[in-house]
Amino acid sequence: MLTLDQFSNFILQNNLCTKQDKLLLAVSGGADSMVLCDLVVKSGFTFGIAHCNFNLRGANSMGDETFVEKFAITQKFHYTAPALIPALMQLKINCPLKRQQEIYVINIFN
């Protein structure tokens, strides 16, 4: 089991970002991405939340977007849900920390 100290130390020791950086987390609304939000908050990082709705699961996709948006608003995090077009959905993003395809920590200001 990953501890909070292990999480923070891994990020800092591998120079993925600093606590002065502003991060944008891509959050799916699933358990893994919600745990990631919790770890980042408790580690003292500053971040906003982005949710990309690919509309692959109909009403469930919209439910995920609504859940993430409500979570972000309730927690007072900056939130964005970019409108995606099919051509943009083909782009690959290089990210310093990647746990699964749906979860990224991206330093957007460096």
Image: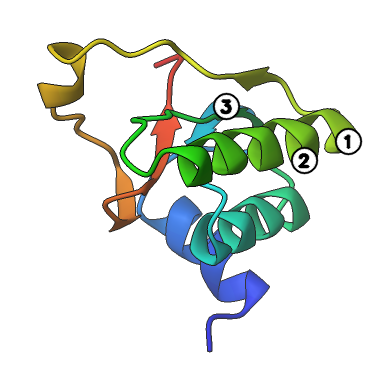
For marks 1 and 3, give the one nearer the viewer: 1
The picture places residue 67, in percent across and down from the top left corner, at 69, 42
Q: CB under 8 Å between callouts 2 and 1?
A: yes
Q: Which mark is residue 21?
A: 3
Q: Which residue in the structure is indicated by mark 2?
A: 71
**Is 95 situated left or right of 63 in this image?**
left
The mark lying in front, picked from 3 and 2, is 2
Looking at the picture, does residue 51 appear above or below residue 31?
Answer: above
Image coords of residue 15 (percent x, y): 38, 45
Please name the residue shown 82% across and 28% down the image.
73
| Quarter of the picture holding the C terminus | top left
Q: Amino acid at mark 1?
A: Thr
49 vs 81: above or below: below
**Where does the image place residue 99, in percent across and percent down from the top left?**
33, 60
Q: Which residue is mark 1?
A: 74
**SS at badge 3:** loop
Residue 105 or residue 70, whichever sits in front: 70
Label 2 sits on a secondary structure element that is helix
For mark 3, does the 10 Å Cα neighbourhood hold few (<14), some (14 to 19), or many (20 or more) residues? some
Q: Type of residue at label 2?
A: Phe
What residue lies at 61% left-to-right and 80% top-to-bottom?
Answer: 3
- Which residue is at the front of the view, 9 or 83? 83
Q: Earlier in the sequence, mark 3 or mark 2?
A: 3
Mark sitting earlier along the chain (1/3): 3
Q: Is residue 36 left or right of residue 10?
A: right
